[in-house]
Amino acid sequence: MPTLIDNTRPRPDAPPGSETRAAVSAAARAKGKGDARGGLYKPREPIYPKRVEGRWRTIKWILLVATLAVYYITPWIRWSRPGGLPQQAVLVDFAGRRFYFFDIQLWPQEVYIFTGLLVLSALALFLVTALFGRLWCGYACPQTVWTDLYILVERLFEGDRNARMRLDAQPLSFDKAWRKTGKHLTWLGIAFGTGGAWIFYFHDAPTLIRTFWIGQGAMTAYVSCALLTATTYVFAGWMREQVCTYMCPWPRIQGAMLDEHSLQVAYLRDRGEPRGAHKKGQSWEGRGDCIDCHQCVVVCPMGIDIRDGSQLECINCGLCVDACDDILGRLGRPTGLIAYDTDSAVAARACGQKAVYKLVRPRTIYYALALCLVSGLTVWGLISRPQADVHIIRDRNPIFVRMHDGAVRDGYTLKIANRTFADRRFEVAFADLPGARLSQPGQPHNSSVEVLVPADQVVAVRVFVTAPPDPDRPASLPGRFVVRSGDIRTEARTVFLSGALNPQ
Amino acid sequence: MASERETDDVTGVETTGHEWDGIRELDNPLPRWWLWIWYGTIAFAIGYWVLMPAWPGLHGYTKGLLHRSDRAEVASELKALDVQRGSGAAMIRKASLTQIEQDPKLQAYAQQVGQSVFGDNCATCHGIGGTGSKGYPNLRDDVWLWGGTLDDIQHTITVGIRSGHPGARQSQMPAFGRDELLPPATISDLTEYVVKLSGRPADAAAVARAAPVYAAQCVACHNADGRGNQALGAPNLTDSDWLYGADRDAIKGQIHAGNGGVMPTWGGRLSPETIKALSVYVHANAGGQ
């Protein structure tokens, strides 16, 4: 059972006189302001995350650089494709209705591959959350990455936590003005860079970067750029943890994935309690390792107190782990008072039992199986895509035409898609109907017709199929259009209606 | 479900008083930025009312300061479409009918124009699929009364059939029965003769009796072998295609009354380019000639 420790209220086992202890985290203070006396709407409680160093912070910096590098560099990778096709490795070409990803090229009707990818992402998120908690939220989510970057900028201009708090409390001065202005201008610059990089995924990047500045870019480019500039600036600069707490559905859903065996940032209350101030040289006997220094609270970008237990707001970024380890190191105590741990392990140790870690659980097995299944289907769907395909629309009016000699002609519209990168001449034949002759409108009859389909295009052609007179032919005959070009062959089923049930 | 508002023990927040299976709903306040966005949408709505057409009145509606109108936009888009179509019409004007039919791009254009013009003007009689009905020729097969070449079709559409146009395609089969040119018994014999022409079993005695009548009355238009004459619009009597019906009663009725349909002249109503496109559309989708 997950345990919730609430430090905003007096603890039942608290020593006398501690009932009035003030809330220590921004989240707790905000909660206090939100009661019936605090009014109907809740102001945002400003959070001033303190700088911290340590293992998890280093990993976060590395991931920040890596994810931003992927985002900014990807549209600039060139990729050689034949003909007049785009030379950009990753391109969502709305005008040309194609999606290019290195050697993969998807058509709009293959959007199910994206569905597969989305389902995969969701399942991967489920599995990772069930195993290791909200790693996505803490390390890879764009909201986290950009907020981290914005806080870095904020620190460069305004200093660390205490300096920032002082600055905000100061009356307006030249010093305050230039620091604030510089911060916001840099934020806006980053926001513009974010929106600016986004649009290169949808147009040829080297072309757009020229046309964009001379006002000749596509209107969608300017609108998207403006929109992303605004959202980046507002979300990462102003709203930050509010996005995670109020706007994002994931914190609400994650409760269904987490259980007592999921790893998450946890305060090991079995080791930390009872907490309290510690004087140098004092004995550690009979007390917990937590010295109530609030370092875990002041570094938290979400403004919570992790010692209150697992909370909706917590993004599992591990900065409190680094902060606590730093203090414990100075005290000469073993690190890991706040650590990635499971609720069950904490509870077991609290009862003096051995902690058991269970990675393999029904939940993780189901998620892993679903993940394998959907991955398999998606990869299979991707590699088994045909190089060409044909779709048939049968004429409905007239459904057949009888010629003067009793021959019968049916009309069809064929849509032949050439998914290769070369122009191809397709030979179209009608199988299963002996003596059938094919023609295109205004053209003479033949045993087959030829259709030229340019590279990467769909061509719609009308084809007439004429069957010689045969009084014994059934009214409806199954037939197939066979479309061939070199070793590429595809076919589609249809019917030939002979009109036998409609005598003259 | 309880309706008492109480304070939640764990969080210290008031509940809404709603309870489902022991789960109570906290009445946490909304964030203030949410409130400001809500105000923003209200401000936007007011701006929208002022700038755009918004409120209905008794006689019309508020036009808005921008004077935006979807009707005006459609009109200007249609005008742009006309300009665009102009280039297609110029291509059709310059090319010959055969060129239009053989060039994939021009044929595609003619098919588009032809289909819509056919649906508007021709489908009433010939059917939307062009298969006609009794008295209205099927345009999809390979049987043509007045000729099925591109030029024949273009001419037929332009002048019409028995349309009153000075150059109209003109012919009239005599009403042998109604005008009492032939006695009923002879008309019955002739019917057997025509049935025999189309390759079906017929009364041999009647056929023998009718042979001299056919030679005297019908050969001029329908030919000695019964294959008809497209210059006169005289149908081929030897095939399986019958405009007014294939059975004996229908054939007898046609000899009796000498029906001939009327097709209007389209020369003055449709532009020459449209008629060209329509001719190609009819020819390309027909069964040949």
Image: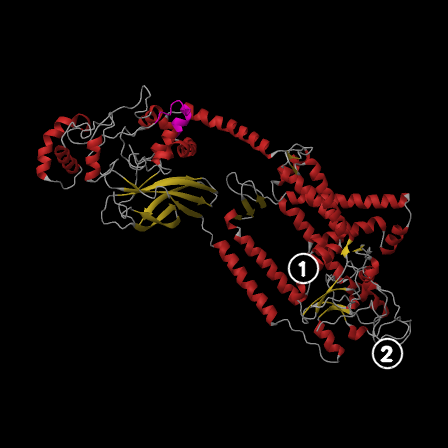
Which residues fall within the magenta stretch?
B264-277
Q: Secondary structure at mark 1?
A: helix
Q: Where is residue A233 drawn, in percent x and y?
A: 74, 47
Q: Where is residue B116 drawn, in percent x and y?
A: 43, 34
Question: Numbered disc 2: what chain?
Answer: A
- Residue type at mark 2 is Glu
Residue projecting furthest to the bottom: A352
In the image, what residue occupies the spot 60% across and 58% down?
A: A121
In the image, what residue occupies the spot 85% across and 72% down?
A: A275
Relative depth, front residue between B246 and B59 = B59
- Quadrant placement of the N terminus of chain A: bottom right
Instruction: Specify the color scheme.
Output: secondary structure
Relative depth, front residue between B255 and A13 = B255
Marks 2 and 1 sit apart, C-alpha to C-alpha, by 42 Å
Does residue A181 appear left or right of residue A194 in this picture?
A: right
Q: Where is residue B150 drawn, in percent x and y?
A: 33, 28
Q: Is residue B269 magenta?
A: yes
Given contact means CB atoms under 8 Å apart, are the residues at marks 2 and 1 in contact?
no
How crowded pointer 2 is (Cα within 10 Å; few <14, some 14-19, many 20+) is rated as few
Does residue A491 appear left or right of residue B216 in this picture?
A: right
Residue of label 1: A250
Question: Numbered disc 1: what chain?
Answer: A
* Image-quadrant location for residue A211: top right
Residue of label 2: A285
- Quadrant placement of the C terminus of chain A: top left
In the image, what residue occupies the spot 86% across and 74% down?
A: A14
Q: Is residue A205 magenta?
A: no
